[in-house]
């Protein structure tokens, strides 16, 4: 049996000691994940942890974090799920949507360790904390396990492509793309576009451009908001992060149906737009 530990890319890059021989199988910088293969481990010497599902989590339920905070190995802390679907800023500078927020104590050294439910199943990978002091302030974050393993479920979206199987098979993740830059939610709020993901710009000749989606632009009376994506294949999109999560459940080359709100001289129009997703450029 081949054993594939999964941890954070920033944790793997910053390790101070090595106790097992490993081979780098693949890394996903966008989601701050890395897959390693253990070498020379006898059968039965390492038992994989049971995988849970982050799609069924509820705010208030108990969770447990395991790690090596400040070098104290095998430390277990407990808390509750404080919030769901948080956008996490990783240590590599990327934004990870759909994050789990917890008040379980997570400190330097917990990064890359598991977040467990009360039955001991893995529901996330601890990744970051929000703190003014550098230590736990009761605001920690984890990457949801459904983003990591195959056939995870988030809401009504079953992930047909997940991170780890792609890393094991190809060494990298090929993500679908609209070939469009999506505005930050704060920018969308300033333009009063309401809920959804605002298209800031499109790549000439790319998927969004070919589908006729319009970017934010300057008009005679000022800034004209671009198309606002409010649903993709029937799944509601309330923010830029929602769109990223929805795209994670699709594949390059797949056709998608978008519901968009378009600003025009006649006011707001609701349109259905068909688009064929391209492969995200590396």
Image (cartoon, rainbow, N blue to C red):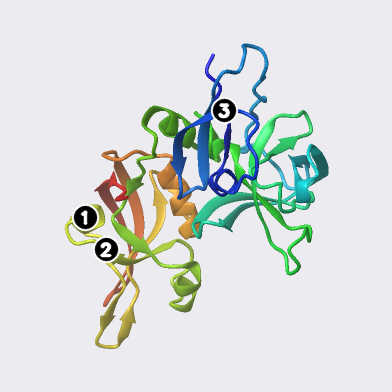
Task: Choose between 158 and 195: the one closer to the eye.
Answer: 158
| Residue matched to label 3 | 21
The quarter of the picture where the N terminus appears is: top right
Q: Nearer the viewer, mark 2 or mark 3?
A: 3
Q: Tell me the quarter of the picture where residue 137 sits.
A: bottom right
Percent across and percent down for residue 54 are 63, 38
**How far across and down, in percent of the image, does residue 80 sit?**
79, 46
Secondary structure of residue under mark 3? loop
Q: Looking at the image, is 62 positioned above or below residue 85?
A: above
CA gap, disc 1 to disc 3? 43 Å
Give the residue drawn at x 45%, y 41%: 27
Q: Tell me whether circle 1 and circle 2 mark residues in contact (CB < 8 Å).
A: yes
Q: In this view, does 99 lie to the left or right of 24?
A: right
**Above or below: residue 171 compared with residue 132:** above
- Spatial separation of the CA atoms under disc 2 and disc 3: 45 Å
Q: Which of marks 2 and 3 is nearer the N terminus?
A: 3
The residue shown at (21%, 59%) is 209
Q: Name the residue under label 1.
A: 206
Give above or below for 108 relative to 114.
Answer: below
Q: Mark 2 points at which residue?
A: 202
Whether residue 236 is visible, yes or no, is no
Q: Which residue lies furthest to the bottom in this view?
A: 221
């Amino acid at each position: 049996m081949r054993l594939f530990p999964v941890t954070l890319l920033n944790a793997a890059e910053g390790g101070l000691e090595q106790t097992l021989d490993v081979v780098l199988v693949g890394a996903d910088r966008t989601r701050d994940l890395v897959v390693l293969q253990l070498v020379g481990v006898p059968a039965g010497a390492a038992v994989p942890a049971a995988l849970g599902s982050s799609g069924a989590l509820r705010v208030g339920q108990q969770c447990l974090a395991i790690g090596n905070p400040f070098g104290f190995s095998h430390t277990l802390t407990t808390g509750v799920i404080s919030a769901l679907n948080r956008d996490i800023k990783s240590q590599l500078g990327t934004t990870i949507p759909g994050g789990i927020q917890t008040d379980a104590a997570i400190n330097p050294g917990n990064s890359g360790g598991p977040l467990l439910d009360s039955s001991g199943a893995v529901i996330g990978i601890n990744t970051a904390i929000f703190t003014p002091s550098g230590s736990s302030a009761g605001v920690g974050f984890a990457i949801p396990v459904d983003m990591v393993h195959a056939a995870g479920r988030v809401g009504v979206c079953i992930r047909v492509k997940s991170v780890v199987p792609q890393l094991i098979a190809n060494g990298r993740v090929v993500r679908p793309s609209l070939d469009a830059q999506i505005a930050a939610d704060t920018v969308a709020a300033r333009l009063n576009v309401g809920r959804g993901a605002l298209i800031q710009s499109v790549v000439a000749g790319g998927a969004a451009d070919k589908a006729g989606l319009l970017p934010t632009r300057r008009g005679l009376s000022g800034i004209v908001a671009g198309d606002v994506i409010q649903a993709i294949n029937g799944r509601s999109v309330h923010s830029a992060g929602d769109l990223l999560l929805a795209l994670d459940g699709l594949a390059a080359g797949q056709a998608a149906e978008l519901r968009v709100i378009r600003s025009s001289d006649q006011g707001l129009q609701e349109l259905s737009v068909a688009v064929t997703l391209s492969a995200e450029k590396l």
